[in-house]
Image: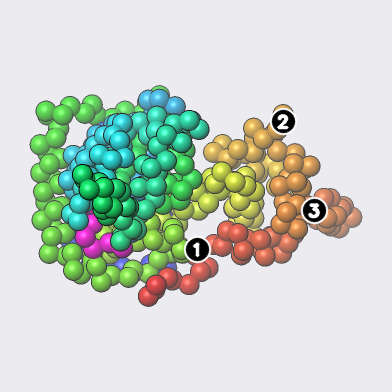
Amino acid sequence: MTDPGARSGDPVAPATPGAGLLSELRSAIARYVILPSEQALDAVTLWVAATHLQPAWQHAPRLAVIGPAKRCGKSRLLDVITETVHDPLITVNATPAAIFRSITDKPPTLLVDEADTLFGSVKAAEKNEDLRGLLNAGHQRNRPTLRVSGPDHKPMKFPTFAMAALAGIGDLPDTIMDRSVVIRMRRRAPGETVASFRTIRDTPGLHGLRERLRAWVAPLVDVAGELEPPMPVEDRAADTWEPLVAVADLAGGEWPVRARAACRAMTAHESGQDEDGGLKSRILLDIRRVFAAGGNPDALSTEHLLAALKADSEAPWAEYGPTGLSARGLQLLLKDYGISSANICFDRDTQRKGFTRNSFLDAWNRYCPDPAEQPSRIGR
């Protein structure tokens, strides 16, 4: 199957037995949980497989499974992940000290449910600042934490490096989100059905799949550690997604293309979700999509641009302000980028307020560069 997000420069490799295992894992996850997109399903599949190669990675990506309300499938997804990852260590409300002592030089995979109880309020977040620090430090290898321990009160180093999945209502702290592959779950719509999950009945099959994944990757640890796959994103996003893309390249077949398509789509979506100035980042991305959908014309009228922005059911613009995003609101969002509307002649005798595509090029390049137009990140 060809992925619609594929790019002509994406690597294509012969399929290995791992490609079939990844497809089995993907189908197993989809049996019990409806993910928000095909790309999200690919990402979860690759993340699970990557946990079995933790010794190979420089960075340990977090998997942030979040949703706006209860009954969005977050805990069910964590149930399935628990039975397929490497050495799962699941907790609902563990102390940082307990987690410190659970991570060794051969780390488990941390699985934290109800993460909103740890970080969902200012008071809770302050109480669990040590845990947030552990999760931040553990994203990168060789970032131990120091604690005074034992009767002699000597400082001791505790390793922090471990892959982790966190599930909860609402966004996690931005420092964790920035180190995560983010899965934004949604409540099932009428007509969407999944199989029930029963531990006694269903875990043997998932455990069998886990063991076959482990057997596939076991001889590949050294090879995986040497990989520097071409990445469609840069900086921390590339650090976070690199293990997933590397697993896809090891598997071959359609997975290298699928992994990079998921990386592009999901990082582009999250770039507009940051807490500080998130809407200002989002508006640039959404305006670029409107221009692209129209064949990248030289200009668009303000009226057309607003209508297209508010027509996107997954964007915030229809609910922005009392009647949705207005011309004035659009001007204010774009003000800091030095972009403003102008009188443009769209017809022979008619001028209307609008925006030229050229007026956005500098802001797009600086704040939300199109991954398709960026050089591959090789040899970091």
C-alpha gap between disc 3 and disc 1: 27 Å
Q: Are marks 1 and 2 in contact (CB under 8 Å)?
A: no
267 vs 40, left or right, is right
Task: Kindly identify which numbered label has been placed on residue 371.
Answer: 1
Q: Which residue appears at 75% of the width and 56% of the height?
A: 339
Q: Residues within 10 Å of mark 1 (few under 14, many from 20)?
A: some
Which residue occupies 12% across, 39% down?
A: 205
Mark 2 and mark 3 residues within 8 Å of each other at the beta carbon: no
Q: Position of residue 106 (x, y in %)?
A: 18, 54
First in sequence, mark 2 or 3: give its number: 2
Q: Amino acid at mark 2?
A: Thr
Q: Quadrant of residue 8?
A: bottom left
- Residue indicated by mark 3: 341
Residue 67 position in % (x across, y down)? 43, 33
Where 189 sits versus 143, above or below?
above
Inspect this view and state whether residue 124 appears: yes
Residue nearer the viewer, 220 or 21: 220
Left-right relation of 271 to 80: right
Kind of residue at badge 1:
Pro
Vertical order, 227 against 134 (above or below): below
Q: From which residue to which does the magenta span run?
A: 51-58
> Closer to the camera, 46 or 135?
135
